[in-house]
Amino acid sequence: MEVAAGIHRIEGVRGANAYLVVGGEGAVVVDAGMPGNEGRIVGYAKGAGVEPGAIRYIVLTHPDIDHSGSVAKLKGLTGAKVAIHEADGPRLAGEKKLKEVKGAAGVLFGLASPFMRFTPVKPDVLLKDGDRVDGLLVIHTPGHTDGSICLYKEGEAIFVGDALRTGSGGEPLLPPGSMTADMQRAKESVKKIAGYRYEVLLPGHGPPITRDASKVMAGFAEKSA
Ligand SMILES: [Zn+2]
């Protein structure tokens, strides 16, 4: 479904939200869901008039498996370059543990992870704050992971990954504590996100905020971060 001009939320992806951005030099996929979603992503793109070879980049907001699980196969189907922040690159490449999870959730996650068949991918592009990917500005927003990033389409939209999520009513919420490496940094990142101007906010989890999103975020940052 097209949620803003040239920005699609890819329907039916399991795990985190995955987005297709068209209108730059090529198309960009932002996050790729759990393992097994590559066919759905390519199928959706075709339906939107984007051939697999036109997808130039797959950008991961961070390497958690619900965002990165389909990346290896999606890269194979499209030939796209995989881009991730340099601080999270080693996790995606399998050089570091994919995720540290705290407390009881950590035990559960640890038990579940052998069944999740994560295929490591060596990133093609290591991103830094201020870089651009096909016109989208990279904003480093650490906290949920060290290398969490947002992608910003100036004045229009921001992709926030798991820097924050939205509830069923579209209200912003902080990322879950047990899954977040550093909550204090995560809150600072929420403030940073609230400092930009955009109409639409596209989270990794929950429905997008489609109107006056930067105003909504300013209010949220003031009371929660
Ligand atoms: Zn997630």
Image (cartoon, grey):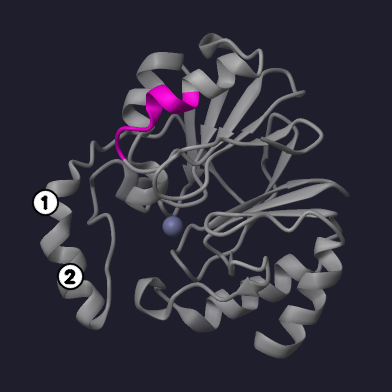
Q: Tell whether 42 sits left or right of 75.
A: right
Dot 2, crowdedness within 10 Å: few (<14), some or many (≥20)?
A: few
Residue 155: x %, y % from top left = 88, 49
CA–CA distance in space, label 2 to label 1: 11 Å
Measuring from the top left, give residue 81's x and y in whole percent. Answer: 48, 24
- 81 w.r.t. 192: above or below: above
**Quadrant location of residue 29?**
top right
Q: Does the magenta stretch include residue 175?
A: no
Q: Is residue 124 visible?
A: yes
Q: Height in image: 23 above or below 148?
A: above
Residue 26 in the image: x percent, y percent? 67, 18
Q: How many labels does the image show?
A: 2
Front residue of 62/217: it is 217
Characterize the local packing of mark 1: few (<14), some (14-19) or many (20 or more) Cα atoms within 10 angstroms: few
Residue type, label 1: Pro
Q: What stretch is highlighted in magenta?
A: 35-41
Asked whether, in this view, residue 191 is left or right of residue 186, the answer is right
Amino acid tagged 2: Leu
Callout 2 touching callout 1 (CB < 8 Å): no
* Front residue of 72 and 51: 51
Measuring from the top left, give residue 60's x and y in whole percent: 49, 43
Res 174 → quadrant: bottom right
Query: Which residue is tagged 2?
Result: 108
At 18% from the left and 41% from the top, the residue drawn is 117
